[in-house]
Image: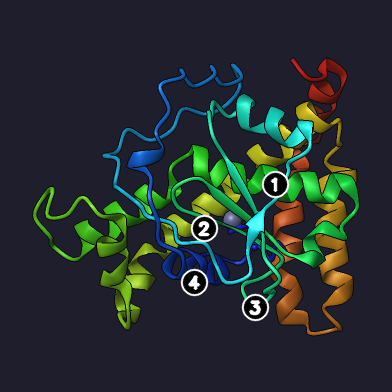
Amino acid sequence: MFKFAFNPSRTAIRRGVAGFLVVCAGLTSRTAAPAPADWFPDPPALRHYVWSYQPCLGCVEYAAPPDWRRMAALAGLQTVRFIHSPDESLGPAYSAAPDVIVLTPSALKLEACQLAFVIGHEIVHIAQRHFDEDANAFSVYSGKPGNWTDRGEDAMQLSEGNFGLALRVSHLWQAQEQEADWVGALLAAQASGCSIESGALAYFRQEIEAGGGVAAAHAPSMERIRQLLPFADAAKRLVELGPR
Ligand SMILES: [Zn+2]
């Protein structure tokens, strides 16, 4: 999503995860995490893996605007690190475990509400612990005993060159992307005042227009638009509710 355009494509995100390893235990703060919005889904009850993030080449910290911080708070996250990367090869934006969102120049050129949707999508991946979910799935499907490793990167490496394993986990990825889309759109609605139309749908439509006429490449964006339409009214109510 936004593990992408973010090219919310799963592949880009996955590569992002594999490429950046880092830290996390050492970054834990003693400050209590904010309570998530009452509508925000509960994260899965999974073990927490230890992830390490190594800053990408040429990457620097990016000062997040207040509405991005509000989105993180609505998701119950205490910390999200925003990084600016000059490298577009992994897509306009993606998340990396445990708490990093990487933005490229093309992402920062998006209209404000489209970018808010992209940021919201990536925040959901972090808040809903999709990286831990992936690591757990790879371990289970590989027949590994419980607690065989604490390191998320060890579990992710199980998929290296294992197309069959990736296929078995693909249903989980699809569910994660759908969740990141609709929950991310609602985060952008409440924190940034963005309707589904001005945020998520506008984003996917510009993706389609930029696609250049390859029907197959357009199908995913069209499908994502269709899946988001039922949430338009909820987003409208959150826009009216405004930042808490
Ligand atoms: Zn995603």
Query: Is residue 181 something one can see in this rendering?
Result: no
84 over 209 or under it: above or below: above
Q: Is mark 4 within 8 Å of ligand 1?
A: no
Q: Please name whichever residue, 207 or 65, is drawn nearer the observer in this view of the structure.
A: 65
Residue at horizontal 72 percent and vertical 78 percent from the top: 217
Give the amino acid type for the residue marked by disc 2 in the picture.
Gln
Which numbered disc, 2 or 1, marks the residue that appears first in the sequence?
1
Q: Distance between the residues labelled 3 and 2?
A: 22 Å
Q: Distance between the residues labelled 4 and 2?
A: 16 Å
Q: Distance between the residues labelled 4 and 3?
A: 10 Å
Question: Residue at label 1?
Answer: 119
User: Could you tell me residue 244's position as x and y percent?
Assistant: 74, 14
Question: Residue at label 3?
Answer: 89
Q: Are marks 4 and 3 in contact (CB under 8 Å)?
A: no
User: Could you tell me residue 5's position as x and y percent?
Assistant: 72, 64
Residue at horizontal 71 percent and vertical 80 percent from the top: 216
Q: Distance between the residues labelled 4 and 1?
A: 18 Å
Question: Residue at label 4?
Answer: 15
Of helix, strand and loop, which one carries label 1? helix
Task: Tell me: 16 left or right of 134.
Answer: right
In this view, the residue farthest toward the left is 145
Quadrant hosting residue 230: top right
Q: Please name whichever residue, 33 or 179, is drawn nearer the observer in this view of the structure.
A: 33
The colour scheme applied to this rendered structure is rainbow
